[in-house]
Image (cartoon, grey):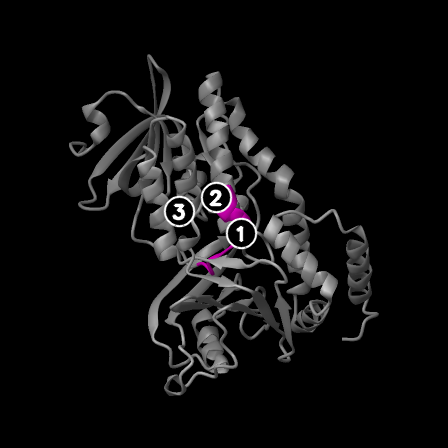
Amino acid sequence: MHHQDDPTLASPEPFDVIVLGGGPSGATAAHDLASRGYRVALLDREGRIKPCGGAIPPKLLREFNIPADVMVCKVRGARIVSPKNQVVGMPIEDGFVGMVDRADFDPWLRARAESAGARRFHGSFSHVERHPNSQGDLISLFYRSKVDQSLSVLRARYLIGADGAKSQLAQKEIERSNEGQYVFAYHEILEAPQGNAESGVKPAFYDPTRCDVFYDGSLSPDFYAWVFPHGKSLSIGTGSALKGFSQREAIEQLRKRTGLCRQALIRREGAPIPLKPLPRWDNGRDIVLAGDAAGVVAPASGEGIYYAMLGGRMAAQAVIECLEKGSPKSLAQARKRFMRLHGQVFWVLGLMQRYWYANDQRRERFVRICEDRDVQQLTWDAYMNKELVKAKPLAHARIFFKNLAHLSGLASV
């Protein structure tokens, strides 16, 4: 076993925490811990860009102290399109949705964690071992160097697993991690049209300040397809859990339908997106999960960046409590706190997805419901504030009865 490049062997002192994975969740956890003076190792594979629409609410900028110039553009509304091409505009009356490009956003977060004091390591997860010693139990994380595939090791008291959907660490170390549910997301990043006649684009379709969402079984039989602006580029993609459904063909079809077939391709990406928080995020001993590894992507919408960063923050907080108390009991608090805040919203969105995305007839009705001003306002309020808006009980009641009418087939289809 080749360890000579391992910086932890030069000094016998282990880290307090290893964070496995440097996406928004892991980078946030590493930043929070390092800012508090803990010894943090941040291990990331580097070079992989996650397929992601890149939408972030303004609340994220405030809560995680993200400067506005990290965004590539601001979106002022959405447009949703039904299987029969019924188009509903959903303007944001006061506010915006920020868009980030994950190719730049994730490295920015990792660099911030490093500037707060986290030590960076590059490589891919191999396995963990445990070694009791005089300082109490330590966990050893073995990883393969990106450069020469040699095996190196990092040691710490605790480990935060933020290594993405279908986390290898979770599969080996966390009970019931096989109970996750996933949709596979595929998208193409294209050069955005500049609105000139030569581009062959219908300027009426693409709007650099609007997200377009397609609820159409031919583009996604069980989720949705999208066109999201990213400043100089755009993301055109689809999600599906259906084996055998050709997402690449669906995007080819969507490019033609939207007049985006001549836009230059920058890159293609695909990855599983979790649809349900895992039932356990910790092993009761030395590991806690965060972000996609814990399954915290909102059903129905597929939104994950805010929830990932919050999950990273809550995992860091749980580990801090463990380190301060000298006991691993607080690891379970990460999931408890997260679900107390967002479990209800995830449950409601899960129900919505299972019902409304089931077939094109229901999708048609779902788009019709979205014409409703009450629905639009509550949708944006909930997105912006990340909570069910309790200040508007009458609007809730109206939506409830409208939904009931649609669900029972009383409303016209």
Res 317 visible: yes
> Do tag 1 and tag 3 residues touch (Cβ < 8 Å)?
no
Q: Residues within 10 Å of mark 3 (few under 14, many from 20)?
A: many
Q: Choose between 65 and 363: the one closer to the eye.
A: 65
The kind of residue tagged 1 is Pro
Which quadrant would the N terminus be assigned to in this image? top left
Say whether residue 253 is left or right of residue 131. Answer: right
The kind of residue tagged 3 is Gly
Residue at numbered disc 1: 58
Q: Secondary structure at mark 1?
A: helix
Tag shown at residue 309: 2
What's the residue at 69%, 67% (across, down)?
370
Mark 1 to mark 3 CA distance (whole Å): 19 Å
Residues in magenta? 52-63
Which quadrant would the C terminus be assigned to in this image? bottom right
Mark found first going from the N terminus, 1 or 3: 3
| Closer mark to the observer between disc 2 and disc 1 | 1
Say whether residue 195 is left or right of residue 47. Answer: right
Q: Choose between 380 and 326: the one closer to the eye.
A: 380
Q: Residues within 10 Å of mark 2 (few under 14, many from 20)?
A: many
Q: Choose between 224 and 247: the one closer to the eye.
A: 224
**x%, y% of residue 315?**
48, 34
The kind of residue tagged 2 is Met
Mark found first going from the N terminus, 2 or 3: 3
Mark found first going from the N terminus, 2 or 1: 1
Residue at numbered disc 3: 23
What's the residue at 60%, 58% (across, down)?
300
**x%, y% of residue 142?**
29, 34
